[in-house]
């Protein structure tokens, strides 16, 4: 028997962050609805749990989403499409509030905390936040601003399996901030399950751990049982990697390859607010890599 009167609608529910949110919410007997291209993936991922419902759809035709929002008290909003993020978030948020949703928790970016218009990623996320924040007659709006995802190490930010080398543009002993997708999901689930008035229109910056490239290479060497080295490259080399391998567009690749002059988010500190919100210490980079070592070849 479901003990909660809450119903949470989740966008991005099958990814690293969304699946953590879903598991944490159903553990509290809170029913959730996931908007997904493949409902069968949702059923398999959550073992056909009776608290998990799936609505099939994508972002080309939002009709199923608009109808599906009805009857939900809260919305978790994660849009990976940076280029169309602003109109998508504005439209979906407006529909949600009109349908009676009382709280939206949005995945934004730590870049928003930089001075305005210093980085293209920050601009997109800032304007997305503003688009929701200034909606008339809206409910509560909580923005989560995570830093560099630990999971990016498995994609383009870390291991080059062909030569056992990780790369970046910073000095080997330069601290970098990392956030665990598990911590992001856990924080979102806490906000989505606690009193709406408690969190109001809060903004939560999220950094789980800080480590130098030297430390990161040492973690990987120990975890994988072979020597992993760090190679410092210049910004152009990193830019070309993003353009030619990851196939980013210019503004996105430029933003991720260069250092901000006016405000350097690459001088990070661990977000101690995670400890307050979760009642536990943030997940360390070493533990996250240890738990996911099967993803390395």
Image: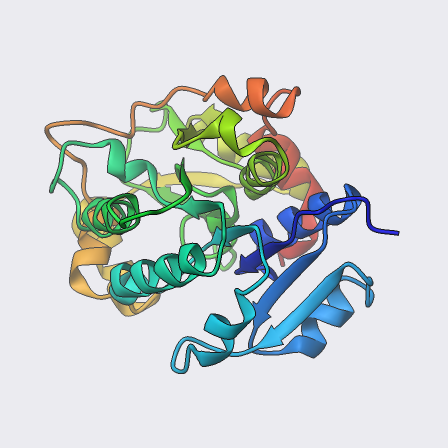
Name which residue lies at 26% across and 64% down: 87
Q: Is residue 138 left or right of residue 257?
A: right
Q: x and y percent of residue 81 in the render?
A: 35, 65
> Is residue 11 among the parts visible in the rendering?
yes
Q: Residue at x 39, y 19 (%)?
A: 269
What color scheme is it? rainbow
Q: Position of residue 26 (x, y in %)?
A: 75, 49
Question: Picture coordinates of residue 246 (x, y %)?
Answer: 35, 65
Look at the picture and state if 218 lies above or below 234.
above
Q: Report the front residue among 213 and 253.
A: 253
Q: Quadrant of residue 239?
A: bottom left
Quarter of the image that includes the C terminus = bottom right
Near-viewer residue (222 or 39): 39
Please tell me whether residue 202 is drawn above or below residue 256 in the rendered image.
above
Q: Quadrant of residue 36?
A: bottom right
232 above or below 238? above
Residue at the spot 11% in from the left edge and 30% down from the top edge? 261
Front position in the image: 255 or 122: 122
Left or right position of 24 against 267:
right
- The residue positioned 30% from the left and 23% from the top of the image is 267
């Amino acid at each position: 028997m479901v003990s909660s009167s809450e119903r949470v609608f989740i966008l991005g529910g099958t990814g690293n962050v969304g699946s953590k949110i879903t598991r944490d919410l159903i553990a509290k007997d809170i029913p959730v609805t996931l908007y997904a291209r493949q409902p069968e993936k949702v059923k398999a991922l959550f073992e056909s749990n009776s608290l998990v419902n799936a609505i099939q759809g994508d972002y080309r035709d939002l009709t199923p989403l608009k109808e599906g929002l009805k009857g939900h008290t809260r919305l978790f909003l994660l849009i990976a499409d940076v280029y169309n993020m602003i109109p998508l978030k504005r439209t979906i948020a407006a529909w949600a509030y009109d349908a009676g949703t009382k709280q939206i928790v949005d995945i934004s970016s730590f870049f928003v905390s930089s001075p305005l218009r210093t980085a293209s990623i920050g601009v997109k996320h800032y304007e997305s936040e503003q688009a929701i924040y200034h909606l008339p007659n809206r409910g509560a709006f909580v923005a989560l601003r995570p830093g560099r995802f630990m999971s990016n190490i498995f994609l383009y930010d870390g291991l080059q399996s062909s030569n056992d080398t990780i790369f970046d543009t910073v000095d080997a002993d330069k601290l970098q901030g990392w956030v665990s997708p598990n911590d992001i999901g856990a924080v979102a689930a806490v906000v989505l399950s606690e009193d709406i008035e408690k969190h109001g229109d809060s903004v939560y910056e999220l950094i789980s751990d800080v480590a130098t490239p030297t430390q990161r290479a040492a973690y990987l060497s120990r975890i994988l049982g072979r020597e992993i080295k760090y190679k410092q490259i210049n910004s152009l080399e990193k830019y070309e990697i993003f353009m030619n391998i990851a196939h980013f567009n210019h503004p996105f690749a430029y933003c991720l390859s260069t250092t901000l002059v006016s405000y350097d988010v690459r001088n990070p500190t661990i977000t101690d607010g995670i400890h307050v919100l979760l009642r536990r210490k943030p997940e360390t980079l070493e533990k996250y890599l240890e738990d996911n070592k099967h993803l390395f070849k």
